Image: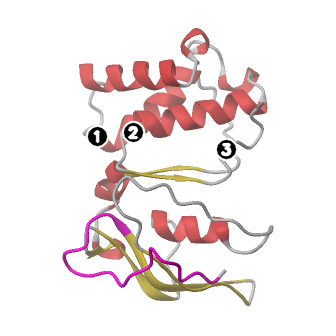
């Protein structure tokens, strides 16, 4: 994937938001992300279009800090993502992947509560704000009536809505969605 569009600009020390500057990444010995630069303005919606295997998911993983670029840099508010703590990144960036799975028995509410983990201290109980964020995310995705239901009993589209609710409960400033309508009915 190669992109250098009108919103592209080099990251600077004072640049706000999530930005990529000439990032590259190989997979299986093949260059899949080739010199991509992105600098979307605050509040913008940016879509990545391309055929299967063109590097869209890989680029999103690089932007989320899950994968490191082979070259180039991803910054968050002008600071390299690699120099930013994982908790800080998780408070700012939420990701909804194409597919999610777990062997653990969780309710819909449990999965959505996972979005609050970056905002809590280890072993601490959820705060009133955490519970409000979870409740609002369930409402926004139409899952309030399924909150106590096992995640494993849901259809693929319902599971995708739960993952979107989890990301919304996280209250991120940047939201990275990898085929978010996967399995969803129109």
Q: Which residues are magenta?
A: 2-18
As for residue 65 lying within the magenta part, the answer is: no
Answer yes or no: is residue 25 visible: yes
Image quarter hosting the N terminus: bottom right
**Residue 136 image-quadrant placement:** top left
Structural distance between the alpha carbons of marks 3 and 1? 22 Å
- Residue 119's disc number: 1
Numbered marks: total: 3
Disc 3 + disc 2, Cβ < 8 Å: no
Q: Which residue is pictured at 70% across the width and 27% down the height? A: 158
Corner quadrant of residue 171: top left
- Tag 1's secondary structure? helix
Query: Any mark on residue 100, and which?
Result: 3
Q: Report if the CB atoms under discs 1 and 2 are less than 8 Å apart.
A: yes
Closest to the observer, 8 or 30: 8
Residue 129: x %, y % from top left: 26, 24
| Dot placed on the residue nearer the N-terminal end, 1 or 2 | 1
Nearer mark to the viewer, of 3 and 2 = 2
Whether the magenta-drawn stretch holds residue 12 is answered as yes
| Closest to the observer, 157 or 45 | 45
Dot 1 crowding, Cα within 10 Å, few <14, some 14–19, many 20+: some
């Amino acid at each position: 994937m190669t992109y250098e569009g009108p919103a592209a600009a080099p990251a600077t020390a004072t640049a706000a938001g999530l930005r990529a500057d000439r990032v590259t990444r190989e997979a299986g010995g093949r260059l899949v992300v080739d010199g991509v630069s992105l600098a979307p303005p605050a509040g913008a919606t940016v879509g990545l279009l391309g055929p299967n295997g063109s590097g869209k998911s890989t680029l999103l993983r690089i932007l989320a800090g899950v994968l490191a670029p082979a070259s180039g840099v991803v910054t968050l508010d002008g600071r390299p993502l690699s120099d930013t703590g994982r908790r800080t990144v998780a408070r700012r960036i939420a990701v909804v992947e194409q597919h999610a799975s777990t062997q653990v028995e969780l309710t819909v509410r449990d999965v959505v509560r996972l979005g609050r983990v970056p905002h809590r201290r280890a072993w601490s109980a959820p705060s009133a704000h955490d519970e409000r964020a979870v409740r609002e995310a369930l409402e926004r995705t139409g899952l309030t009536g399924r909150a106590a239901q096992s995640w494993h009993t849901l259809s693929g589209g319902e599971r995708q809505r739960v993952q979107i609710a989890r990301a919304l409960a996280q209250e991120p400033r940047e939201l990275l969605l990898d085929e978010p309508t996967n399995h969803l009915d129109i």
